[in-house]
């Protein structure tokens, strides 16, 4: 995949910090309101609770409770004067203290493993209880991918993977390629089955470390992984957006009946699929499609940017620039003058309508394709007035995207 261009300017780091400070503090165990108040204290210095309440727009009673919590956890100090003033303790010291506590907690947990196993070994367990089949429902794409990785790692002989092309691209950004490389060295067979979209996009399968796969009619747009002991099945995936990942769910089971049936089903799919053997030499036809053609992809969802960029790359576009906000989109546009821009509407700094208007002033003939999930009447009317080259609604068909490329 084409490396993303990084614009070296003074605002990049500042912008990232502005966007992420609350999330970063939440990673250290603070609630959202607590993170807001602590960050406000870092900025304001020594102030009264009422001033913090006004600054953060959090009611005064709630503010007092949060300040007490922050004092108890070592983030905040108060004076003995009247009125009482609060100030943030040194951020580096406070955060490092949290890390040390977490490390100690992990050390204690590791020690407790052996203690628990020793206690467990002294208890009488019935075989029937141990061998009962299990079925677990998991949600959120991140959790599903973690279970997929574990299932791949646990495979002892043969693994079936029936997954969509969009999911194959996503897996490239996880630990899956590394795990596949590890198990293939142990002579474990991976039988990958995917849709027709990848029948000519071999490079994206090869990135997973797989040189042989089959094109089949997938039973769904979800995921199906199974070996001789476990099965993981998920519902439909969200192809082009990172915004609905919480709604994705999957079932994982070691039920012998389900495992046996799914293996039989995958056997059938594999036998009826079209074989694809990836050759090491570059395909001359694909090489011929490479164009001196520049595309700019702009979307606030980084996941959407990466996936659309990957699709464009396998369609023959080698020069792809990316960004996630309107301000940098205009900077890149002025600097490189792309041939086509795929532009989302809801983006930070400047929205898509403003960016489109400014681009028209830079180059009135430049192709600007709006890609959006907003189908409201108001947006459609504004798009008619803005007059982009085309409007494509998410989840979009890749064929509608490629018709604007000179392939």
Image (cartoon, rainbow, N blue to C red):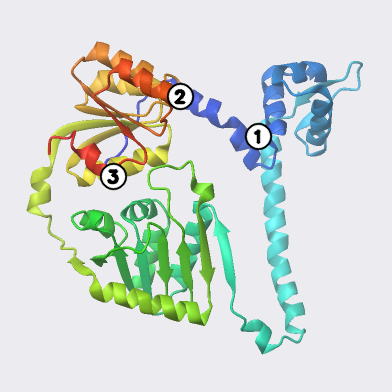
Q: Is residue 335 left or right of residue 60?
A: left
Residue 362 location, quadrant? top left
Residue tagged 2: 348
Tag 2 near tag 1, CB within 8 Å: no
Which is more foreground, mark 3 or mark 1?
3
Residue, x 43% and y 55% (percent of image)? 236
> Could you say whether the residue bearing mark 3 is in a helix, strand or loop?
helix
Residue 231 position (above or below residue 31)? below
Q: Quadrant of residue 165?
A: bottom left
- Coordinates of residue 203 in the picture (x, y in percent): 23, 55
Q: How many marks?
A: 3
In space, the residues marked 3 and 2 are separated at their CA atoms by 23 Å
The location of residue 277, given as percent across then percent down, is: 18, 66
Q: Classify mark 2: helix, strand or loop.
A: loop
In front of the other: 178 or 343: 343
Residue at the far front in the pictured view:
377
Give percent across and percent down for residue 172: 36, 53
Instruction: In the rendered structure, find residue 310 and report the number of the disc placed on it.
Output: 3
- Viewer-closest of 40 and 58: 58
Q: Kindly report which numbered mark, 2 or 1, lies closer to the viewer in this rendering.
A: 2
Secondary structure at badge 1 equals helix
Q: Which mark is residue 92?
A: 1
188 is higher (above) or lower (below) than 203: below
Seen at 51% across and 61% down, the residue is 250
- Give the left or right position of residue 176, taking residue 26 as reference: left
């Amino acid at each position: 995949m084409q490396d993303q261009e990084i614009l070296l300017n003074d605002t990049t780091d500042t912008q990232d910090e502005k966007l992420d400070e609350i999330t970063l503090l939440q990673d250290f165990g603070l609630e959202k309101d607590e993170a807001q108040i602590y960050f406000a204290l870092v900025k304001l210095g020594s102030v009264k609770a009422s001033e913090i309440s006004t600054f953060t727009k959090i009611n005064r009673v709630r503010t007092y409770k949060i300040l007490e919590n922050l004092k108890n956890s070592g983030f905040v100090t108060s004076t003995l004067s009247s009125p009482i003033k609060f100030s943030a303790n040194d951020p580096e010291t406070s955060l490092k203290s949290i890390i040390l506590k977490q490390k100690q907690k992990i050390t204690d947990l590791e020690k407790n493993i052996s203690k628990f196993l020793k206690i467990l070994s002294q208890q009488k367990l019935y075989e029937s209880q141990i061998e009962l089949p299990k079925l677990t429902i998991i949600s959120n794409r991140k959790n599903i991918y973690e279970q997929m990785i574990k299932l791949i790692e646990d495979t002892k002989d043969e693994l079936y993977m029936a997954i969509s092309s969009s999911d194959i691209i996503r897996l490239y950004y996880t630990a899956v390629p590394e795990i596949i490389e590890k198990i293939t060295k142990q002579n474990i067979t991976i039988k990958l089955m995917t849709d027709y979209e990848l029948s000519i996009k071999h490079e994206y399968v090869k990135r997973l470390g797989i040189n042989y796969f089959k094109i089949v009619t997938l039973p769904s747009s979800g995921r199906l992984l199974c070996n001789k002991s476990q099965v993981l099945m998920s519902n439909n995936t969200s192809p082009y957006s990172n915004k609905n990942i919480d709604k994705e769910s999957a079932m994982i089971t070691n039920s012998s009946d389900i495992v046996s049936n799914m293996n039989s089903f995958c056997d059938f799919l594999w036998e009826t699929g079209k074989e694809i053997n990836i050759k090491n030499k570059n395909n001359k036809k694909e090489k011929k499609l490479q164009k001196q053609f520049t595309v700019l992809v702009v979307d606030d969802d980084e996941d959407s940017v990466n996936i659309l960029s990957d699709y464009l790359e396998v369609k023959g576009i080698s020069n792809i620039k990316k960004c996630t906000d309107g301000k940098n989109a205009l900077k890149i546009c002025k600097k490189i003058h792309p041939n086509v821009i795929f532009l989302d509407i809801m983006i930070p700094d400047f929205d898509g309508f403003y960016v489109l208007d400014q681009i028209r002033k830079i180059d009135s003939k430049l192709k600007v394709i709006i890609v959006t999930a907003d189908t409201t009447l108001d947006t459609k009317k504004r798009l008619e007035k803005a007059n982009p080259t085309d409007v494509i609604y998410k989840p979009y068909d890749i064929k509608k995207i490629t018709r604007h490329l000179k392939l």
